[in-house]
Amino acid sequence: MNIQKQKYKQKNKHQQNKEHEGHNHDREGLESSLSALDKRLQQIAEHMERSQMAGYVDLLNRPISLIWRNLLGGTARGVGIAIGFTFFAATILYVLQLLGALNLPIVGDYIADIVRIVQIQLEGKSY
């Protein structure tokens, strides 16, 4: 009878050790998952700080400031487009004048007509 009790106790001890090891394994898995989650949350927080999300939300909460910035930005874009187009058109006209001076047979007459029309328009006269 004592031998059976000892075997029973040993068997219970063995099962308890296995359960204890299982709990340790589960706990280690949980800790590693929490560690990975914490690391990912830190990365997300860093990305949000770099993207200046707080400044954007602050700007959305002040509509007057948002309107003013958009107005200035639109004006700057309009002036930039106007200046850029002026330089582009002047360059094209200069190239056309040079080509017109070469007296190419058909192309030269066509280019000369275009240059003359543009110059008349710039002077404000009708052709």
Image (cartoon, rainbow, N blue to C red):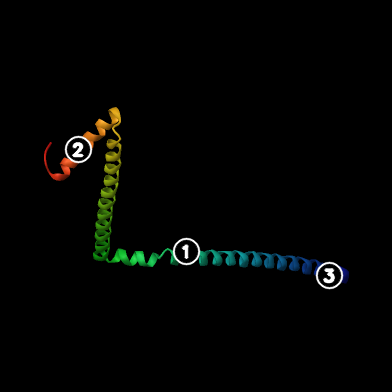
* 47 left or right of 26 in image: left
**Mark 2 or mark 3, which has the lower sequence index?**
3
Residue 85 coordinates in the image, percent (x, y):
27, 48
Label 3: how many residues lie within 10 Å, few (<14), some (14-19) or many (20+)?
few
Of residues 37 and 112, the one drawn nearer to the viewer in this rendering: 112
Query: Mark 2 Cα within 10 Å, few/some/many (few <14, many 20+)?
Result: some
Q: Which residue is mark 1?
A: 47
> In this rendering, which labeled residue sits more in front, label 1 or label 3?
1
Badge 2 element: helix
Give above or below for 77 relative to 14.
above
Residue 33 lies left or right of residue 10; in this view the side is: left
On residue 2, the disc is none
In the drawing, what numbered circle is on residue 5?
3
Q: Amino acid at mark 1?
A: His
Q: Which residue is mark 2?
A: 116
Q: Where does the N terminus fall, quadrant-wise?
A: bottom right
Task: Determine which quarter of the picture holds residue 101.
Answer: top left
Q: Residue at x 11, y 41 (%)?
A: 125
Question: Mark 2: which amino acid?
Answer: Arg
Q: Residue furthest top?
A: 106
Please identify, in this view, whether the residue under mark 2 or under mark 3 is nearer the observer. 2
Picture layout, residue 19 above or below residue 98? below
Kindly indicate whether the residue at mark 1 contacts the one at mark 2 (C-beta within 8 angstroms): no
Local secondary structure at mark 3: helix
Give the quarter of the image for residue 37.
Answer: bottom right
First in residue order: circle 2 vs circle 1: 1
Q: Tell me where residue 14 sits by quadrant.
A: bottom right
* Amino acid type indicated by mark 3: Lys
Is there a contact, CB below 8 Å, between mark 1 and mark 3? no
The residue under the point 44% across, 67% down is 49
Nearest to N terminus: mark 1 or mark 3:
3
Marks 2 and 3 sit apart, C-alpha to C-alpha, by 118 Å
